[in-house]
């Protein structure tokens, strides 16, 4: 074999090796870089379902959480006391029953009521007698057998008897107008029987001082919250309040602080604040424990976004900045606080920009994959 042939063969193999190495190198680079990724575009069907929110500047809201209990609305609560002494009969209601205004709760068999009835009869008889005496005196005066002074006296006696009858009728009316010796206890308002301190045959006296029934309208309730000294400066008249209970964990009741008791309870060392809450469906029951979140505004302004725009991943928070369907970018953000459905941000996105506020996690996963 000639030297030229060997030289040509070696040269050919060298060139082949170089080309192969170059091809492998190029292939490695291609595999390393991978194919060029196409930009993600939100499909029209999904875009129609999305909520796009504009980033704003908002006054910072602070939330203070307080322990509290539900109480009766004492402005719409009536304690019923006995107007006469006697024995309780025919109790018609129990604690928790709903009653209407004027509904009978029970009756009292009373000697006082029997006395009022007797006084009525006496007064009516006295009025009849004095009327006849007045008429007779007037006839005698016409015949010259009685003086003007006699007529005047007879007229005065009649008017006094009339006044006495009117007074007895008023007393009887105040006590139920019953002339059978019974005092009928009626509900002065519509509401619920929340207290009942008598049973059938209970003997009662007007000087006892204890109420026999308590009726409360529960369409509004008071939520009495406890404020510790360190938080007194953070609550104000008119602050909005959100109330939650163990009984209804997914339900939020809304109200406002309408009274601040500006003294500390000597036992618990807390200040009481009152929130009036509408309770049309009677969901809130007196003596329930509740949690009150008091919301108040500060003068400082923060960048704010809807809570639905926030994404948590790898121990960080993100939002999706939106320009158009083909321009959605992931932005890390730093949170100052979250109040209700509003997120306050320290940095990460600027007011005037737009973010995806619904189904953000779905698009975030697609962008990452």
Image (cartoon, rainbow, N blue to C red):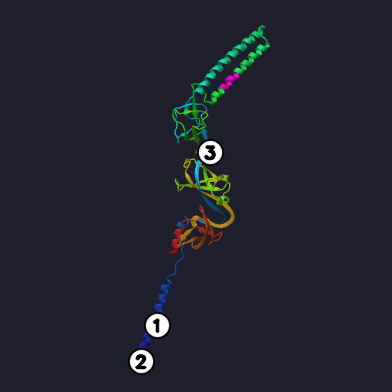
Image coords of residue 48 (percent x, y): 47, 55
Disc 2 from disc 3: Cα separation: 118 Å
Q: Residue furthest bottom?
A: 2
As for residue 22 lying within the magenta part, the answer is no
Q: Residues within 10 Å of mark 2 (few under 14, many from 20)?
A: few
Q: Nearer the viewer, residue 353 or 113?
A: 113
Image coords of residue 238 (percent x, y): 57, 46
Q: Residue at x 55, y 17 (%)?
A: 122
Residue bearing mark 2: 4
- Residue 298 visible, this angle: yes
Q: Residue at x 57, y 14 (%)?
A: 128
Q: Nearer the viewer, residue 181 or 31?
A: 181
Residue bearing mark 1: 18
Q: Are marks 3 and 1 in contact (CB under 8 Å)?
A: no
Image coords of residue 300 (percent x, y): 59, 56
Task: State which mark lies toward you, 3 or 1.
Answer: 3
Tell me the quarter of the image containing the N terminus. Answer: bottom left
Question: What range of the chain is rendered magenta?
Answer: 162-168
Residue bearing mark 3: 74
Q: Nearer the viewer, residue 327 or 98?
A: 98
Give SS at disc 3.
helix
Task: State which mark lies toward you, 2 or 3.
Answer: 3
Of the two numbered discs 2 and 3 on the same chain, state the one appearing first in sequence.
2
Q: Residue furthest front?
A: 267
Q: Give the total number of marks visible in the rendering.
A: 3
Tell me the quarter of the image containing the C terminus. Answer: bottom left
As for residue 164 lying within the magenta part, the answer is yes
Q: Residues within 10 Å of mark 3 (few under 14, many from 20)?
A: few
Of the two numbered discs 3 and 1 on the same chain, state the one appearing first in sequence.
1
Task: State which mark lies toward you, 2 or 1.
Answer: 1
- Residue 324 visible, this angle: no
Instruction: Note whether 317 is above or below 7 in the view shown.
Output: above
């Amino acid at each position: 074999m000639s030297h030229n042939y060997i030289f040509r063969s070696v040269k050919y193999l060298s060139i082949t090796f170089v080309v192969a190495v170059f091809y492998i190198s190029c292939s490695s680079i291609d595999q390393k870089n991978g194919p060029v990724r196409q930009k993600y575009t939100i499909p029209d069907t999904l875009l129609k379902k999305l909520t796009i929110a504009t980033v704003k500047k908002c006054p910072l809201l602070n939330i203070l959480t307080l322990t509290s209990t539900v109480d009766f609305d004492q402005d719409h609560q009536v304690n019923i006391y006995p107007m006469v002494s006697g024995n309780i009969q025919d109790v018609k209601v129990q604690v928790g029953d709903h009653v209407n205004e004027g509904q009978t709760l029970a009756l009292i068999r009373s000697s006082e009521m029997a006395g009022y009835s007797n006084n009525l009869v006496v007064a009516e008889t006295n009025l009849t007698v004095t009327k006849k005496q007045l008429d007779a005196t007037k006839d005698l005066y016409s015949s010259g057998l009685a003086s003007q002074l006699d007529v005047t006296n007879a007229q005065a006696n009649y008017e006094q008897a009339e006044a006495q009858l009117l007074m007895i009728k008023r007393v009887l009316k105040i006590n139920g107008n019953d002339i059978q010796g019974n005092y009928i206890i009626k509900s002065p308002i519509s509401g619920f029987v929340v207290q009942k301190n008598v049973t059938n045959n209970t003997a009662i006296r007007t000087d006892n001082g204890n109420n026999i029934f308590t009726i409360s309208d529960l369409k509004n309730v008071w939520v009495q919250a406890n404020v510790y000294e360190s938080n007194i400066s953070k609550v104000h008249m008119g602050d909005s309040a959100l109330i939650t209970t163990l009984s209804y964990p997914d339900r939020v009741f809304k109200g406002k602080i309408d009274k601040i008791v500006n003294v500390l309870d000597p036992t618990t060392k807390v200040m009481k604040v009152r929130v009036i809450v509408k309770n049309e469906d009677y969901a809130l029951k007196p003596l329930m424990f509740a949690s009150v979140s008091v919301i108040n505004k500060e003068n400082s302004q923060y960048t704010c976004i809807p809570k639905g725009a926030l994404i948590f991943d790898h121990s960080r928070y993100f939002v999706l900045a939106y320009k158009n369907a083909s321009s959605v970018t992931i932005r890390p953000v730093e949170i100052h606080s979250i109040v209700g459905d509003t997120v306050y941000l320290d940095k990460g996105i600027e007011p005037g920009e737009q973010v995806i506020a619904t189904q953000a996690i779905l698009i975030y996963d697609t962008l990452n994959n």
